[in-house]
Amino acid sequence: MTQILNGKVALVTGAGGGIGRGIVLAMARAGAAVIINDAGVSLSGEGGSVTPAQEVKAEIQAFGGQAIIDTGSVADWGAAQEMVRKAKDSFGRLDIVVNNAGILRDAMFHKMTPEQWLSVINVHLNGSFFVSRAAAELFREQESGAFVHMVSTSGLIGNLGQANYSAAKLGMVALSKLIALDMKRYNVRSNCIAPFAWGRMTSNIPAETPDQIARLENLKKMTPEKNAPLAVFLGSDDARDVTGQIFATRKNEIFLMSQSRPLRSVHTADDWTPETIRDRAIPAMRSSFYPLDRSQDIFSWDPC
């Protein structure tokens, strides 16, 4: 990888493992000084340890990169402010923010508790706002900056048992678009990546027949690091004209995802009534209705 981020400073949240680790390592290899934010909690948000961040920092320093650690929670406004202060105090500036930190508290909607809902919303959606808002002041002063928000096809398309996660991730998509609109005047960009990683899928994939085993081996190649190159590019000056977009990455595939726009319209010379909507509007639009797809229904082929 070339030094496409030479002289840049990047803050990556949730960078102690998985996709965040892959991104922060790639950004450091591309020349950026990095802030490794990770609270070291479990997938469900419990516990806490500095060890994951320390291990990533040691790996970066081993190849000559610059890195510091932050263990604050993105769901805390003060902690988000502190992350940005650390970046400026340590490296003099901040150029890239990757909102990647997240937890899962999956449950079917009719069984989901308020705590499960709020905990996931607080980390994903509120956390992305807090960190982005903290960085926005510095980006305005510099008149430059790039946000990369790690979203999910669970929000863009849908998935079972993830109402909290899906709502938070789709909220991040809207947040990114509004950041792109509001901060364009300051040369600040904001984009989304919906990443895939094989580890999330293995629990429900059978591996008994030779074909199934071969498929699973192919999915294992869909490693977290496969998502990093696009994040590095979006943080670079080469992406200066790319903003307000939603991408998805899956192994060696990159997708540009659609955004909500009108599909069909119906009109009446008179006021609509419930009955005329029933008899005319809905039949005219029904062929364009979306089915209750899940992410795996849309991405139904093996990654390539």
Image (tube, rainbow, N blue to C red):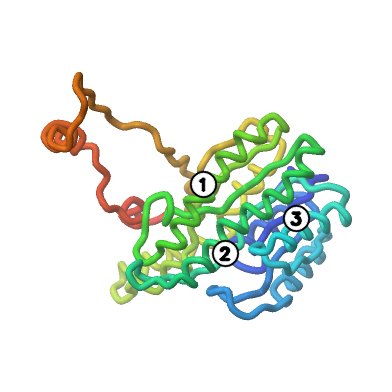
Residue occupying image coordinates x 11% and y 34%: 279
Crowdedness of circle 2 by 10 Å Cα count: few (<14), some, many (20+)? many
Under circle 1, the secondary element is helix
Q: Is 49 placed above or below 103 here?
A: below
| Residue 138, percent from left and from top | 79, 44
Q: Is residue 291 left or right of residue 152?
A: left
Crowdedness of circle 3 by 10 Å Cα count: few (<14), some, many (20+)? many
Name which residue type carries label 3: Ala
Indicate which disc residue 173 carries: 1
The residue carrying mark 2 is 102
The residue carrying mark 3 is 28
Quadrant housing residue 182 = top right
| Residue 158, percent from left and from top | 37, 55
Q: CA distance from mark 1 to mark 3?
A: 26 Å
Crowdedness of circle 1 by 10 Å Cα count: few (<14), some, many (20+)? many
Indicate which disc residue 163 carries: none
In the image, 71 versus 123, the foreground residue is 123
Q: CA distance from mark 3 to mark 2?
A: 21 Å
> Mark 3 or mark 2, which has the lower sequence index?
3
Under circle 3, the secondary element is helix
- The residue mark sitting in front, 3 or 2, is 2
Residue occupying image coordinates x 57% and y 63%: 122
| Residue 54, percent from left and from top | 76, 72
> Mark 1 or mark 2, which has the lower sequence index?
2
| Residue 105, percent from left and from top | 47, 71
In the image, 239 versus 131, the foreground residue is 131
Name which residue type carries label 2: Gly
Under circle 2, the secondary element is loop
> Pointer 1 and pointer 3: residues touching (CB < 8 Å)?
no
Q: CA distance from mark 1 to mark 2?
A: 15 Å
Q: Is residue 245 left or right of residue 67?
A: left
- The residue mark sitting in front, 1 or 3, is 1
